[in-house]
């Protein structure tokens, strides 16, 4: 499956950036699209409608669960169902942990982490309904190369990096929780992407352009890889080859530390015996 003919795709943070690129790609694949953004997405809607898309939008703050519930209702009222949710809205702030403004850090956590949980919680039943009806049912969380390790080649975005590690955790737990419902779950993990904002930044700063452009991907490429990976069932959709070296180094370092643990000779005597049987968890005993 490569197209999304008549599927209904919700994109949060869809007015600009990677979200808008995902919306464009969804329209190209035949989907109907609902954009949600904290800002008015009228310009994006106009563009996508000119391209032939059946598109609508609403203003919503994903960190507010009531906004998310309203987004879900408006989507179903407008299009009748939900097939793909692109959990993309994010708020980034530059700085190290010792320098960051705590209020900005809190906002980043609320949008990127709590907002992500709100989206999954509210939309999972609608995706379940779609899967039960034999329709496409997918969740795509937008992470980052920051989900794969701490990038050594960029200035500190420390809180953003923390939240994108959380997006990986959200994806893995959502896969566990939603797989029995027939919902596919993936995480998009791009590196530098030439969105409108990034392109304007590098065009205004030749030094930044030299540092970024050779290692960046077009947003259309990222969006195409996102849907290809989602529909193929790829768990982590890493798009940029320049992410590979530091991500692999991080994975190897983690495994070196983990392998220092002693081998348990009789794993079957432990509740976490590797069978995947959640009924063996001692916390279920009192239920």
Image (cartoon, rainbow, N blue to C red):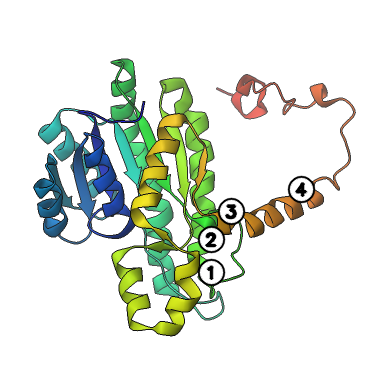
Mark 3–mark 1 distance (CA, rounded to whole Å): 14 Å
Crowding around mark 3 (Cα neighbors within 10 Å: few <14, some 14 to 19, many 20+) is: many
Sequence-wise first label, 3 or 4: 3
Separation of marks 3 and 4 at Cα, in angstroms? 14 Å
Who's the residue at 39% across and 58% down the image? 110
* Marks 2 and 1 in Cβ contact (< 8 Å): yes
Along the viewing direction, whichever of 144 and 125 lies nearer the viewer? 144
For marks 2 and 1, give the CA distance.
6 Å
Q: Position of residue 19 (x, y in %)?
A: 30, 53
Q: Which residue is drawn at 42% across and 71% down?
A: 93
Q: How crowded is mark 4: few (under 14 residues within 10 Å), some or many (20 or more)?
A: few
> Residue 162: which disc?
2
Q: Earlier in the sequence, mark 3 or mark 1?
A: 3
Judge whether 174 appears above or below 261 on screen: above
Kindly identify which residue carries mark 3: 148
When asked about the image quadrant of residue 263, the answer is: top right
Question: Where, quadrant-wise, is the C terminus in this rendering?
Answer: top right
Q: Report helix, strand or loop for mark 3.
A: loop
The circle on residue 158 is: 1
Q: Distance between the residues labelled 3 and 2?
A: 11 Å
232 up-or-down from 182: above or below: below
Residue 63 at least partly seen? no
Distance Cα–Cα, label 4 vs label 2: 20 Å
In this view, 229 is above or below 180: below
Looking at this view, is 214 or 113 the one in front? 214
Please report whichever mark, 1 or 4, sits nearer to the chain's N-terminal start.
1
**Disc 4 secondary structure class:** helix
The residue labelled by disc 4 is: 255
Separation (CA) of disc 1 from disc 4: 23 Å
The answer to whether mark 3 and mark 4 are in CB contact below 8 A is: no
């Amino acid at each position: 499956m490569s197209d999304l003919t008549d599927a209904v795709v919700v994109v949060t943070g869809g007015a600009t950036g990677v979200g808008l690129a995902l919306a464009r790609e969804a329209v190209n694949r035949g989907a109907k699209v609902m954009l949600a953004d904290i800002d008015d997405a009228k310009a994006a809607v106009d563009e996508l409608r000119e391209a032939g898309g059946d598109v609508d939008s609403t203003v919503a703050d994903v960190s507010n669960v009531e906004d998310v519930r309203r987004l879900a209702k408006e989507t179903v009222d407008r299009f009748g169902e939900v097939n793909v949710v692109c959990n993309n809205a994010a708020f980034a702030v530059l700085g190290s942990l010792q320098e960051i403004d705590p209020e900005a850090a809190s906002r980043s956590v609320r949008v990127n982490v709590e907002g992500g949980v709100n989206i999954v919680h509210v939309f999972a039943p609608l995706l379940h309904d779609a899967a039960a009806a034999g329709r496409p049912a997918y969740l795509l969380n937008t992470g980052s190369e920051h989900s794969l390790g701490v990038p050594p080649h960029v200035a500190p975005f420390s809180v953003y990096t923390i939240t994108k590690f959380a997006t990986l955790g959200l994806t893995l737990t959502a896969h566990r929780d939603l797989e029995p419902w027939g919902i596919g779950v993936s995480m998009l993990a791009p590196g530098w992407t030439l969105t409108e904002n990034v392109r304007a930044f590098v065009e205004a700063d030749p030094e930044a352009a030299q540092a970024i452009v050779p290692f960046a991907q077009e947003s259309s490429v990222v969006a195409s890889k996102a849907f290809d990976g989602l529909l193929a069932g790829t768990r982590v959709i890493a798009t940029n080859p320049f992410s590979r070296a530091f991500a692999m180094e991080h994975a190897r370092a983690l495994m070196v530390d983990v392998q220092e643990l002693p081998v348990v000779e009789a794993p079957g005597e432990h509740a976490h015996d590797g069978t995947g049987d959640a009924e063996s968890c001692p916390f279920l005993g009192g239920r």
